[in-house]
Image (cartoon, rainbow, N blue to C red):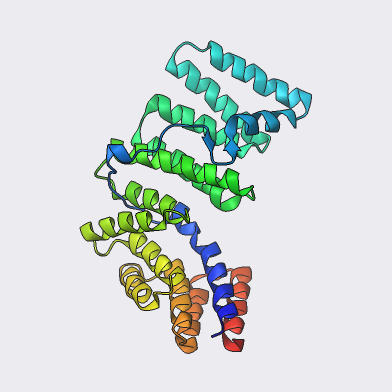
Amino acid sequence: MTSAGKIGLLLATIAITVAIYFFGDFKGEGKEKDETPTETTTSEGFDYVLYKQTQLQSLEPVNRQKLEELEAALGNATGDEEKIAVLNQLIAECESQKLELIATMYSKEIAKLKNEAKLWDVTGTYFMGLFYNLPEEPEVQQFELEEARRCFVEATQLDTTNLDYQVRLGVTFMEDQTQTMQGVQLLLGVVEKDSNHVSANLYLGRFGIISGQFDKAINRLNTVISADSANIEAYILMADAQAGLGDTAKAIGYLEKVKALVPDAQFQENIDAYIEKLKNS
């Protein structure tokens, strides 16, 4: 298979595999306190406060006024319950005006007030949704990734027995090109506790493909398929791994299994395009 063919298929795989983050079975464990990122509203090249001001200024005056009035009400709120009620109104208003990052920052404020592991986890997942799915400038995406990491750190500290949170935390490092190996180590820690862990093995398999360690990726993905024979992402990644080893027939075989698992016509059409790419590479 040519390098161009491998890269094209891999990019398509990654686009589909990110759905694992939202719909998969994530497991993880606690993180040491001294590894907690510092609280900030800035990351390199990005200032959230300025971003928020710019976004609000771009609104129609009537819509901006609604948010300003709610901000004032938040400032005047006296107890946590009252603050949470106003924050929920702010979230709803921001979502209606497609201010997704601002809405998620308000969700983070609720997580701070309630300080529950599950709520920190949900908020971190919201940030990762923005990171994956909204076209933003690189500095904005990096901020979203860092905010997700902070949320998952909080979740892992509040519930050190929940493996789900550790995997999600590890993914935030794996998606950061400067800290990939830290994420790998976190996921390896999970599989040390549970060698058959589906999500950890799935992401480690994905990393094996990206790093060209196709044999290791196949071992990880075989573990996933043994535990979950209907795992679509695992079959797609397995096709990439087999293609990386030059075994086109096996790669196509795994993609055919994907087609059998997903009856959606548009999805099958995309898989057929991947198969044609393999055949012609």
- On the rendered structure, is 129 left or right of 51? left
- On the rendered structure, is 42 left or right of 180? right
Is 31 situated above or below 274?
Answer: above
What residue is at 47 percent from the left and 43 percent from the top?
146
Q: Position of residue 28 (x, y in %)?
A: 31, 50
What residue is at 29 percent from the left and 61 percent from the top?
197
Q: Position of residue 249 (x, y in %)?
A: 48, 89
Asked which quadrant contains residue 71, the reply is top right
Q: Nearer the viewer, residue 261 or 99?
A: 99
- On the rendered structure, is 75 left or right of 61? left
Number of marks drawn: 0
What residue is at 61 percent from the left and 19 percent from the top?
70
Is 81 situated above or below 117?
Answer: above
Q: Position of residue 252 (x, y in %)?
A: 50, 83
Q: Quadrant of the C terminus?
A: bottom right
- Can the viewer see residue 277? yes
Q: Nearer the viewer, residue 222 or 50?
A: 50
In the displayed image of the protein, which residue is found farthest to the left?
Answer: 193
What residue is at 31 percent from the left and 71 percent from the top?
223
